[in-house]
Image (spheres, helix red, strand yellow):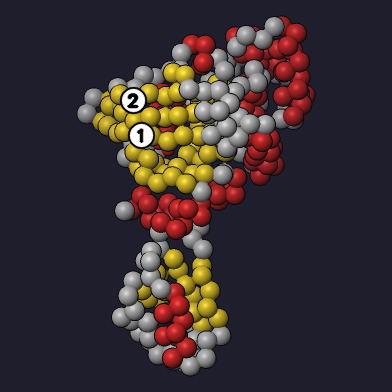
Amino acid sequence: MSTHGLQVQGISKRYGDTVALADMSFEVHPGELFGFVGSNGAGKTTTMRIALGVLEADEGQVLLGGRPVDLDVRRRIGYMPEERGLYPKMKVGAQLAYIAQLHGLSRAEAADAVHRWTTRLDIAHRVDDTVSALSLGNQQRVQLAAALVHDPEVLVLDEPFSGLDPVAVDVMSHVLVEKCEAGVPVIFSSHQLELVERLCHRVGIVRAGHMQAVGTVDELRDRGTTQLEVHAPGAAPGWADGLPGVRTVGVRDGRTVLELLPGADDQAVLAAALRTGPVHSFAVRQSSLTELFREVVAA
Ligand SMILES: Nc1ncnc2c1ncn2[C@@H]1O[C@H](COP(=O)(O)OP(=O)(O)OP(=O)(O)O)[C@@H](O)[C@H]1O
């Protein structure tokens, strides 16, 4: 497991006439935190369910540690489903212990793991409550504990951050970072793109069931347009018109905002700006993941 991580290879899935996945491929390496993003209905949950082995692909395969996902491999995955899969009337502690034992832990190991994770996730004082008595955010902490109690070799989390308060977001983030630092491949889907940008080593942007762009946020930036903000007070409107690969987006606070296509020469822009008079500032504006996402899904 440790050398290969998770490999999704050309999976396709249809529901009747609906194409949920079309040749979806990517890898999550050991020790990597991978953010899985895409519009509603893009195919994230379907991919994760197939990776876990609860749903079958029409084509393609998913490997964990170089092995196809069978029952034995499935037991080594920590999964947090989007629809949340807890028994509402069962007590938190008993439920977690039950899940741990289902994954092969002894009763004593399960009790240890439940104590460790409920303490870590700050829900130890709720172990004797039923799940339904907990707030949604605390139910989510229980759900994360359920994904972790058997010390999985890979973590697959479907929207683990949705609906969490900022403190719970921090707790969840720390746990995921800790797991990936311990060498576990971690993949999670999210619509909270600032969080994905902050946490993840690499990001995959899914569009219509296909991996449209994948890489570090910097790599994704290199594929897209660059924005430049130029403060040249003496420049007349339209001063950058005609420069190859350059488009004027607008003027903001007296500064001209330009968009440069990949390969456009920023030094030619600077030279053109200097021909208009003094240049007080000339700065590249880095696109956020949210902006990159919009570019990719609109392409
Ligand atoms: N059981 C099902 N029956 C029919 N269509 C389905 C089923 N499950 C998913 N789909 C369709 O497959 C496509 C992918 O859905 P999926 O839930 O994987 O998207 P998602 O990226 O997780 O979306 P979201 O961000 O809204 O959770 C959608 O068009 C969806 O309607």
Farthest-out residue, top: 107
Q: Is residue 202 left or right of residue 116?
A: left
Where residue 75 sits: x, y (%)?
A: 55, 14
Label 1 crowd bin: few (<14), some (14–19), many (20+), radius 10 Å: many
Q: Is residue 73 left or right of residue 25?
A: right
Q: Residue at x 45, y 53 (%)?
A: 220
Q: Is residue 202 visible?
A: yes
Query: Mark 1 highlights which residue?
Result: 24
Label 2 crowd bin: few (<14), some (14–19), many (20+), radius 10 Å: some
Secondary structure beneath disc 1?
A: strand
Disc 1 residue lies near ligand 1 with CB under 8 A: no
Are the residues at dot 2 and dot 1 in contact (C-beta closer than 8 Å)?
yes
Image quadrant occupied by the N terminus? top right
Q: Is residue 134 left or right of residue 239?
A: right
Three-letter residue code for mark 2: Gly
* Looking at the image, residue 292 lies above or below residue 170: below
Secondary structure beneath disc 2?
A: strand
Three-letter residue code for mark 1: Met
Query: Mark 2 highlights which residue?
Result: 60
Give the image quarter of residue 168.
top right
Q: Residue at x 35, y 84 (%)?
A: 238
